Image (cartoon, rainbow, N blue to C red):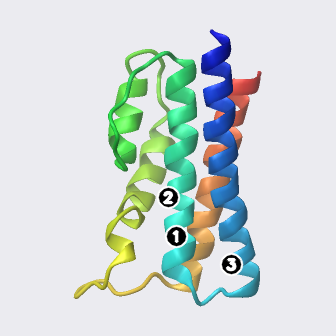
Amino acid sequence: MTEKQKKLIQQWFEKATNDIKTAKILLNNSPELTDIITFHCQQAVEKYLKCYLIKLDIVFKKTHDLNYLLDLMTEKINVPEKMYGIAKELNDYAVEIRYPREIGGTPTKIEAKKAYQLALEIKNYISEKIYN
C-alpha cells in the first residue's frame, strides 16, 4: 500500500469517526433529532466501507449505496451476511431521510439508537480489517 493510500484511508476514517461522534452527541443531547442521527450513522458506515475499499485497492464510484460498496468488496473478500443486513437497515438514511416523506415518517428514537449501534459494529469490523 502506498503512502498516499494510507493517508487517504486515515482521512476517510477520521471523517467517518466524526459522523459517529456527531450521532452520539445528538443521541445524548437532542435524541428527538432522529433523522439527523440516522443520517450521520449511515454516512459513517459509508465512509468506513470506502476506507476498506481503498485498502483493498478497489475503485468505487461516488455513491451512498452501502450494498454497492459491499458488492465491490466481494471481488476480494468474503463479506459476512451480517454486513448486508446492516446495509439494508441503514441505506435509506443516506439521502431520503434528509427530505420530508409522505410515507414512513421520521425514524423513532429506538431506530436512531439501533442505527448508532450498527454504525459502531461496522466501525469495529473495519478497524480490525484496516489496522490489524
Identify which amino acid the numbered label 2 is placed on. Answer: Gln
Where 43 sits versus 131, above or below? below
Marks 2/1 in contact by CB < 8 Å: the verdict is yes
The picture places residue 27, in percent across and down from the top left corner, at 69, 78
Q: CA distance from mark 2 to mark 3?
A: 14 Å
Amino acid type, callout 3: Leu
Residue 38's tag is 1
Residue wearing tag 2: 42
Label 3 secondary element: helix
Check disc 1 and report its element: helix, strand or loop: helix
Q: Residue at x 50, y 85 (%)?
A: 108
How far apart are the two marked residues, 3 and 1, measured between alpha carbons?
Answer: 10 Å
Q: Depth check: 122 or 2 in front?
A: 2
Q: Is residue 1 visible?
A: no
Q: Is residue 49 left or right of residue 12?
A: left
C-alpha separation, residue under disc 2 versus residue under disc 1: 6 Å
Q: Residues within 10 Å of mark 1 (few under 14, many from 20)?
A: many
